[in-house]
Image: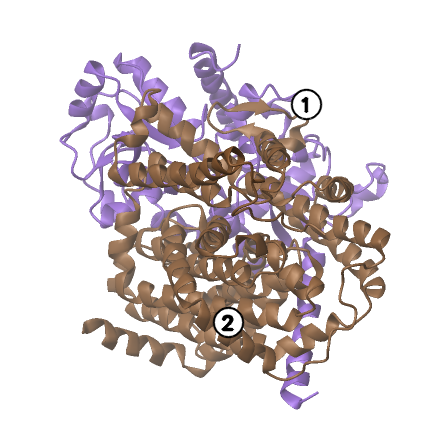
Amino acid sequence: MEVFGQLAGGFAVALHPINMAMLFVAVVLGLVIGVLPGLGGTSGVAILLPITVFIAHGSLPGSDATTAIIFLAGIYWGALFGGVITSILFNIPGEPWAVVLLFDGFPLAKRLGKPGLALASSFVSSFLGALVSTILFTFFALPIALKALEFGPAELFAVFALSFATLIGLGAEAPMKSLAMLALGLLLAAIGFDTITGEQRLNFGQISLLSGISFVPVTIGLFGIGEILASAEEQGIGFVENISARLGLRDVLEAVRELRKRLRLVLSNAIIGFFFGVLPGHGATAASFLGYGLARQYSKNKENFGKGEISGIMGPQAAADSAGVASLVPMITLGIPGSPTSAVIMAGLFIWGLQPGPVLFIQHPDFVWGLIASIYLGHLLTFVLCLLAVPLLAMIMRVPYAIITPFIVVISIIGSYSLNNSMLDVFITVVFGVIGYWLRKMKYPLAPLVVALVLGDSTERELRKALIAGHGSPLYFFNSGLSTVLLVLAIVLVLIPLVRSIRARRRGVSPTAGAGSAAAHP
Amino acid sequence: MSRPVIRTLAILAAALVTLSACATANAPSSPTPSTAPSASATLAVIQPSHPVEFVISTAPGGGSDIYARAMATIIETKKFSPQPVTPLNKEGGSGAVAFQYVYEKTGDMHYVMITLNSFFTTIITQKLSFKATDFTPVANLALDPFFLWVNDDSPWKTAQDFIAAAQKDSVTVAGTGTKQEDEALFRRIEDTMKTKPFTYVPQTSGATVAAALAGHQGGVMATVNNPSEGLQLYQAKKLRPLCAFMPASPTTAVYVSLATCKSQGIAIDDYFIMRAIMAPPGLSAGQQQFWVDVFKKVYDTDEWKKFMSDNALQPDFKSGADFLQFIQQYQQLHQDIATKFKWVP
């Protein structure tokens, strides 16, 4: 097959010493950027963009535009892996796609005392997800990107509806409380600028609120600060204080065993993540939530979710990393970036004097295939680096919580500030820290709020775009086969628990069957 | 600890130092006190004394973001400014957040901003407390033309076919944002050609507009994408331009044979997206001149010339009185559209 020849050529380019050296520097930088909350992959890539002009123009011996894109993409791979570390260890998301890891990552690390296993589980599923995605990238980039163009507002709305449906029942032991949190999340998501009508909404005349309430400072507050306030009161009740010293690769081997038990989940989430990533403008974060919802639906132990379930780490992480790689596919093939980070990488292409699109494959095959080969190598490199770091990172958790606490507060505040260089975000973090503490005390589940806040904006936009296109008729959603299937599936998923609980109530049994637990419930 | 682990740690630490250095460079600088002694200012060279923020009103990767980063990169690599010029995204409210932010930096030359037509439409429709003419104009570096695009498999071969269809039924079209330049152009077509009102589906970016047309998403039949936004899908044989809203056919190689819309009966040839630089209100003439000189130097580089031709931009440098007149003309044009189509009550 022709593809293998081209891929071999790509590896020859990517394995060139200068390219390997820059790839190594990039993934290390990416890991650090990923770990720092607030400073995301997108801004990291944007900050380093000017440097790549020197790289692309041969300022380093043997470097060219291929070196430059290998470098920028490498930062993204590092950030995809590194973003989860602070989620798992400190309950603060390092990157938007690591928010969902707060639900089960931190509980597994802190409450069950297995930080090494939590980290290793995330890394192995990241790697496998990325590998699946890169293979699909190698063989089917153009046809899949063209297929994704047909995904209109109705189909996208159906996908979001399905995401919500898979997450129904998070915190189901108190359905009304979950509903209230869902509504609060949607309300917060509505603040800002109504992009459909071009009107200001719920901002009380504040121009700075027109950017909307970003979910990153909210989750840093709700989880990071809220957890600290709650545990200060509990004095660490429910925490395993003496996490056993487990240096070496034992955690990694256990994670691999756990992965083999969930191979079908991880592989199917990786494939779903790939398709999600190819859709323009959504990328890894939305994919991670759908991945979590699906992991929960597949699972026989739904009640373990939110308490440190490994599927709740592996499912979303495989989908997120796969979507991250896939977001480069429509950018390279058609000039339509699949995620904000890939949009900045595309800006790089323009600045180096290249045009993305089908012509790129013909005019600059070395560039395209060098990049594809570097995705394999970059992930391998990141994976090995991360696994070597697991024992060290796990050791941080042996430091008494009281000593880590001030450090977490500081990085929470710096993280929210560096998001947009704005004090408003710091204010939001602190306010939601207090709200998070209060919600914990009142036993309100936090997960539905976060899900609604993250997905609310996009869901609303696609719904309204579809209604404009359908001239106001809701029947428009059933015009295409795909959106019909997805919507029916979503409705069924919502109805099943409802029917079950009504039946159970008729028989006089308390309706707990199949109920998932609230994330981050003490 | 084993040796590779220590080495990894050392690299991580080194990376952290590098990164925090970058972060510091990116941090906002406090505005210079406006009480600077004016006597010494006449003697001293007027130039920024600390890092400059280059404010971008769109998200990373959007059209104006790419242009701003290309300019900032040229300024950096050619050392046109004694202080670093760092791009900073202040997206939100179709530019309102960025405009407000820069407006509040009155008299401070350490802020410049890249603007497009939202600089007029947003200030008008969001009823902001200031006008476009309140800012200190620096320069316009290029004009980005509009094309009329259809899907490659569309039955419409010419602009007349499109107009004939639009006069019979409401055609579904897509564009970036609501009450912004794309919708403004469609409303002008509606007004000039007496078509049925277009069904306008707002999208989030130029790239998603092109994608919506290429995929027939939501029945979208036409767009007015810029040439650079449609280029990749044109080459992939998914999109096809019908005509250019320009006084003469474009000179870019791929589009050279494209007819003007005027020659096909749509008499609009005076509407472009400006790619212009603005500074906060109240800069002194000397401070204004500093930035005019910097961006003139950018405009004259081979890098910028190549960038303009790659992206099918019309080279068009305006500063001083010419630019001021252009701003006033565009402000009036957008005010008229906003009034006519009841964008403002």
Number of numbered tags placed on the structure image: 2
Using the numbered discs, state the Cα–Cα distance from disc 1 to disc 2 in whole angstroms.
50 Å
The colour one sees for chain A in the rendered image is: brown
Location of residue A210 (image quadrant): top right
Query: According to the image, label 2 marks what residue?
Result: A258
In the rendered image, residue A86, in percent from the top left (x then y), is placed at 66, 62
Q: Is residue A439 above or below residue B223?
A: below
In the rendered image, residue A271, in percent from the top left (x then y), is placed at 36, 59
Residue drawn where x is 62% and y is 32% of the image: A180
Label 1 and label 2 in one chain: yes
Q: Chain of mark 2?
A: A
Location of residue B10 (image quadrant): bottom right
Chain that is coloured purple in the picture: B
Q: Is residue A54 above or below residue B134?
A: below
Question: Nearest the camera: B293 or A350?
Answer: A350
Residue drawn where x is 35% and y is 57% of the image: A329
Which amino acid type is shown beneath numbered disc 1?
Phe
Location of residue B82 (image quadrant): bottom right
Residue B157 located left or right of residue A393: left
In the rendered image, residue A34, in percent from the top left (x then y), is placed at 60, 62
Q: Label 2, secondary structure: give it.
A: helix
Q: Residues within 10 Å of mark 1 (few under 14, many from 20)?
A: few
Question: Nearest the camera: B91 or B283?
Answer: B91
Question: Nearest the camera: A117 or B329?
Answer: A117
Which amino acid type is shown beneath numbered disc 2?
Glu
Q: Quadrant of the N terminus of chain A?
A: bottom left
Residue drawn where x is 61% and y is 53% of the image: A306
Q: Residues within 10 Å of mark 2 (few under 14, many from 20)?
A: some
Say whether residue B314 is visible: no
Query: According to the image, label 1 marks what residue?
Result: A204
